[in-house]
Structures are given as structure tokens and as C-alpha cells.
């Protein structure tokens, strides 16, 4: 592997950096976008249960906000009603929307970087191949060179294109997967917020 990297020349080093960054981002997003950290399945039912008769205490709301992204959104609604009992429906819905946008922003963190790597990696690979081909043909003597050496040089130049595709394809697949995952989680959070909003109307003045 090290000999291939050496043979491919300097253009492969940006690709190596991209591969390390992509792997780091993929591992980080796989860890972050878990249901237990974003939208625990039974969290809404627990919130509805503890607020059936009255609003939870401030320390309970704070623990809810620290539980997960969905917990933070639900806690924002509970806190708004507790602080302003005369809040109307539109303002309460706006509180949920603002908290939801903050949660979505955190869920989408680093996805643009991963998408950029997926787009740029094939171009970097092509750049490395072009640079390698220029070096190969520039080193040939006017009277013609060794065909075997020329073929070997071309194969070495193509290492960059192959490595660029090896970086781009998994990056693009995970980028699409994470985008779909975020959309599913956002839909779930919106449905939970709507249910809690309807539940909290009874506490409005």
C-alpha cells in the first residue's frame, strides 16, 4: 500500500486526507444520529404522562432538555407554558419551531463537509491522473520510449482515479443515508411536537 502511495505521487495526499476526514465524519454521525440520542421511542409518552395533571417542576424540565434533541424541543414548549401561562397557540408553536430548528441544525452538522468530500474526491483523483500523465509523456524521449515503462507509468497514474472513487463512493452513500436519517428524525420530532402542543393547550390561560 505504501509503495502504491509513493508511486501515485503528491496528488494522492489530498485524497488520503479526505479519506481520513470522511471516515471520522461517518463514525461521528453514526454515533450522534442514533435514536436514543435524538428521539427516544417512549420519551413523548413519558412527558405526556408526567404532565397529565400539572406541568412538571423546573428541574424535571431541565433533565428532559438534557435527555436528547427531542427532549430539548419538548422541554422548550413546557418551559414556555410554565413561564407564560397566557401564551397563545401561535407563539407556542413558534417556540417549538425555533427549538426544532436548533435541533435540526445540530443533526445536519458536518453533512455538508461529507457531501463536499464525496463530490471533490473524484475530481482530485482525476487531477492526480492528469498530473501523472503529464509527467509520463513529458519524460519520454523524442525518439520513443519503452512501451512497457509507458504502460507501467499510465497504470501508476490511474491509481489516483481509483483511489478517488474509493473515497467518493462510500462518502456519497453515507451522505445520502444520513440525509434520509435526518429527514426521518425531523418528521418524528414534528409529530411529537404537535402532540405535545395539543396536550399543552389545556394549561393556557
Image (cartoon, rainbow, N blue to C red):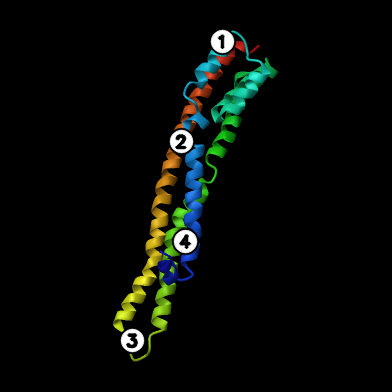
- The tag on residue 183 is 2
**Sequence order check: which comes first, mark 2 or mark 4?**
4
62, 98: nearer the viewer: 62
**Sequence order check: which comes first, mark 2 or mark 3?**
3
Name the residue rendered at 60%, 31% in the picture.
98
Per the image, the residue denoted by label 1 is 52
**Sequence order check: which comes first, mark 1 or mark 4?**
4
Query: Gap in Å between the C-alphas at discs 1 and 3?
Result: 85 Å
Q: Which residue lies furthest to the front in this view?
A: 2
Q: Which residue lies furthest to the left in this view?
A: 147
Query: Gap in Å between the C-alphas at discs 2 and 4?
Result: 30 Å
Q: Which residue lies furthest to the top in this view?
A: 53
Name the residue rendered at 49%, 54% in the picture.
20
Pointers 1 and 4 in contact (C-beta within 8 Å): no
Query: Relative to 183, does residue 83 appear above or below in the rendering?
Result: above
Q: Is residue 148 rendered to the left or right of residue 200? A: left
Pointers 2 and 4 in contact (C-beta within 8 Å): no
Name the residue rendered at 47%, 46% in the picture.
26
- The tag on residue 15 is 4
**Sequence order check: which comes first, mark 4 or mark 3?**
4
Pointers 2 and 1 in contact (C-beta within 8 Å): no
Answer few, some or many: residues within 10 Å of disc 3's Cα (few below 14, many 20 plus, some between 14 and 19). few
Amino acid at each position: 500500500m505504501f509503495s502504491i502511495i509513493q508511486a501515485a505521487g503528491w496528488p494522492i495526499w489530498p485524497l488520503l486526507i479526505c479519506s481520513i476526514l470522511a471516515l471520522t465524519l461517518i463514525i461521528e454521525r453514526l454515533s450522534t444520529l442514533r435514536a436514543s440520542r435524538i428521539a427516544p421511542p417512549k420519551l413523548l409518552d413519558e412527558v405526556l404522562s408526567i404532565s397529565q395533571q400539572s406541568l412538571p417542576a423546573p428541574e424535571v424540565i431541565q433533565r428532559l432538555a438534557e435527555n436528547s434533541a427531542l427532549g430539548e424541543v419538548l422541554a422548550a414548549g413546557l418551559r414556555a407554558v410554565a413561564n407564560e401561562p397566557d401564551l397563545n397557540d401561535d407563539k407556542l408553536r413558534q417556540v417549538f419551531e425555533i427549538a426544532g430548528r436548533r435541533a435540526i441544525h445540530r443533526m445536519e452538522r458536518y453533512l455538508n463537509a461529507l457531501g463536499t468530500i464525496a463530490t471533490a474526491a473524484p475530481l482530485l483523483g482525476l487531477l492526480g491522473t492528469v498530473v501523472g500523465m503529464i509527467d509520463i509523456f513529458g519524460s519520454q524521449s523524442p525518439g520513443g520510449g519503452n512501451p512497457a515503462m509507458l504502460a507501467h507509468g499510465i497504470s501508476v497514474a490511474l491509481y489516483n482515479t481509483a483511489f478517488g472513487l474509493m473515497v467518493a463512493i462510500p462518502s456519497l452513500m453515507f451522505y445520502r443515508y444520513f440525509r434520509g436519517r435526518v429527514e426521518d428524525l425531523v418528521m418524528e420530532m414534528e409529530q411529537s411536537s404537535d402532540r405535545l402542543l395539543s396536550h399543552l393547550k389545556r394549561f393556557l390561560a
